[in-house]
Amino acid sequence: MAARVRRLSAVTAVVLASSGLYLHKKQLDINDLSVVRFGRAAATTFLISYDYLTAFKHVKNDTEEYWELKSKVHKRSAERLRDLCCANRGTFIKVGQHLGALDYLLPPEYTSTLKILHSRAPQSSMQEIRQVIREDLGKELSEIFVSFDERPQGAASLAQVHKAVLHDGRTVAVKVQHPKVQTQSSKDILVMEVLVKAVHWLFPDFAFMWLLEEAKKNMPLELDFLNEGRNAEKVAKMLSHFPFLKVPKIHWDLSTKRILTMDFADGGQVNDKEYIQKHGINVNELSENLGKIYSEMIFLHGFVHCDPHPGNVLVRKCPHSGKTDIILLDHGLYQVLQKDFRVEYCKLWQALINRDLKEMEQSSRRLGAGDLYPLFACVLTGRSWTAVNSGISSAPITQSEDVEIRTNAARYLPQISELLNRIPRQMLLLLKTNDLLRGIESSLQTRASSSSFIYMSRCCVRALARHKRSKCRSRLKRLHLSVCEQVTLWKLTVYQVCVWLRSCVLGQWLSALFGLVHTTHT
């Protein structure tokens, strides 16, 4: 233990000395925000590491006292991390939000504490907003907009959104990047990388380099709002057959790398129960339609919106049709799935839905999980191993199962870390997306609905049939595959009708009638 504390002190000394040398060479003011962030990050890392190193010295491992103390250390550390993210803003908040979304991968003390970061995002002043618009669009605010609401509609880690009216009367949403984020993000990620490596050196079981690798890869894309605009247009075209999906139209003449102007879309957050009840929105239909959107993104197209937290998914009643619209916002982070990975992922989910444990194990191993395939199945579905064995589409979710999963997230953190370092990088954002969608379903109380699994099955069947046809040269064989696909889809339709009949009043009435007839005959 003493040796590890000395190693921690040595790391801290090196970090502080190197930061001093860096400041001297760059001749930066000590009050510069980037430098302050670096110092805070190093100090917070030291405090958290020291707490984990010393807190358990006089406690026996795997006792009730040990787990109670560990929960307290997790909570203290999560609060320190949250305070660091709030103070350092920008990239730190973005990474903290990512961690807060990993409900079934991290201890609950961390996820519950870090979720607050979605409401603690920084706000730029109007002076800063005007400066960015002046620099990027070459005009003053008043030359472009008749009115510009100074109070942001929403503020996020990288940008904030203002409601404005153009001179032609159109109402738009203007997303403006925080002015310092662009220059600071690469430095922030470098600081995080150094500190995470230092922590891994002290605690070999801590293997979260994957998170920094993903941030390194994705941050430049998220900071390019022109890329976000292209993603928005692509997904709108790709899913145009869903009349309930709305993606705001981009105004390219008023958009740059730091400014994105789009049609203004009003609505309530998808987890706002009060708004949903007030407007008479059917939560089952809403959840089912959201499942349809993501099933097609993942299994059929391999182009996935990876940040579906409630602030990015709005709902509203269409004033003309009276039907529920889903408005998808913030298209900066998309994952493009390679074809072979997507096909294997389809096979895995099909096996999980059909309770084909042999195929589930084989697909999991092919995706890199190895002997950790039971843990992989639990992480992917957010269900216990008992539920996976019983069939995730038939076993209802209980509160005790949720508690078991969250408890195991703390107990098996080293194994989860190892698993996340084994599986393909593409899987990481999918796991985050799964967790965010599960969070929405939990708030709507529609988790594990049979209709969602049926549509997922449809998408998997279509994707696998399309893949097999692409590999086949014989027209007769392709025709055979198409017929088999349609037969399977027809079976799923029949099953869906049966599920609907069982759940509706008519189905209950028919069931009672058949039961009465059967009793009369016997």
Image (spheres, rainbow, N blue to C red):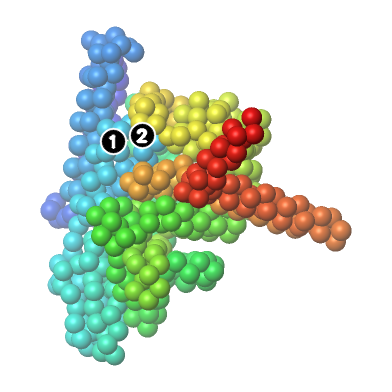
Left or right: 395 as drawn, with respect to 121: right
Residue 102 in view of the camera: yes
Left or right: 149 as drawn, with respect to 388: left
Q: Are marks 1 and 2 in contact (CB under 8 Å)?
A: yes
- Disc 1 marks which residue? 110
Q: Secondary structure at mark 1?
A: helix
Q: Is residue 184 above or below residue 352?
A: below
**215 or 318, nearer to the observer:** 318
**362 or 452, nearer to the observer:** 452
Quick one: label 2, few (<14), some, or many (20+) residues within 10 Å?
A: many
Quarter of image, res 227: bottom left
* x then y, percent, for residue 84: 20, 43
**384 or 202, nearer to the observer:** 384
- Disc 2 marks which residue? 106
Left or right: 82 as drawn, with respect to 461: left
* x then y, percent, for residue 358: 66, 30
Q: CA distance from mark 1 to mark 2?
A: 7 Å
Left or right: 499 as drawn, with respect to 475: left
Quadrant for the C terminus in the image: top right
Residue 413 in view of the camera: no
Q: Residue at x 27, y 52 (%)?
A: 273
